[in-house]
Image (cartoon, rainbow, N blue to C red):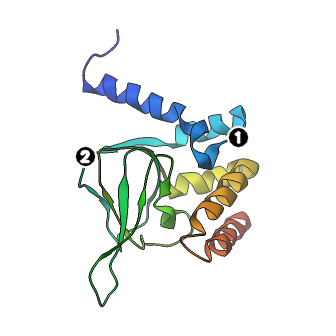
Amino acid sequence: MFGTGKLSIRWIIYYQMIGTLPYIPLFQDLGPVQTALLKPLFEQFICPTDTVIFEQGTPAVYLYLLIKGEVVIRYKPYDGPSIILTRLRDGDVFGWSAVVGSPYYTSSIISETQIEAIRIRRNRLIKLFSEAPETGKIVMDRLARIVSPRWGNAQAQVQSLLNSDQKQ
């Protein structure tokens, strides 16, 4: 009746990760209906240590929520060597370029440990905003507050994105 291979273990891990959604700072204090809207939009992402999750300059597709592990954010200026901007840990969010309308990631993400995360495609999050605007606005506002220390005009970028999507 139930599979016993790697596929079954992956599903168990996925549901455990999705179960942590209400405890991730981005989604804390959302109601059960709002959380239920978000859960099916996410997919599991697991990778080993020293994995390049995405490179600076590649298309910005996913927003990641780090459940377990550590990643480093690296930035490569055009005229110098790569530098470490910061390290992220459990509960942090990365890949926000995919949400604020940037067509490409502005930095690289490399795993420093094994990573367990969930991720959502930009288009799915934008669709949520159009179908459930109250929930979308809460999530986008929180995202802007989280990333704004790392990017000074994130709030304006998110608001611009929200305004353009409402007009479509």
- The answer to whether residue 37 is above or below residue 71 is above
Q: Position of residue 71 (x, y in %)?
A: 36, 56
Q: Residue at x 44, y 60 (%)?
A: 61
Residue 97 relative to residue 33: left or right: left
**Is residue 133 or residue 32 the one in the foreground?**
32
Residue 141 relative to residue 75: left or right: right
Q: Secondary structure at mark 1?
A: loop
Quarter of the image with the N terminus in it: top left
**Is residue 52 or residue 71 the one in the foreground?**
71
The image quarter containing residue 78 is bottom left
Q: Report the residue marked by disc 2.
A: 48
Quarter of the image with the C terminus in it: bottom right
- The answer to whether residue 90 is above or below residue 166 is above
Q: Secondary structure at mark 2?
A: loop
Q: Position of residue 150 (x, y in %)?
A: 53, 70
- The answer to whether residue 29 is above or below residue 93 is above
- The answer to whether residue 134 is above or below residue 58 is above
Q: Amino acid at mark 1?
A: Asp
Q: Position of residue 148 (x, y in %)?
A: 60, 69
Judge the density around disc 1: few (<14), some (14-19), many (≥20) Cα neighbours within 10 Å. few
Q: Amino acid at mark 2?
A: Pro
Judge the density around disc 2: few (<14), some (14-19), many (≥20) Cα neighbours within 10 Å. some
Q: Report the residue marked by disc 1.
A: 29
Marks 1 and 2, how far apart at CA: 31 Å
Q: Position of residue 98 (x, y in %)?
A: 49, 64
Comes first in the chain, label 1 or label 2: 1
Q: Residue at x 63, y 73 (%)?
A: 157
Q: Residue furthest right?
A: 134
Q: Residue at x 39, y 29 (%)?
A: 13
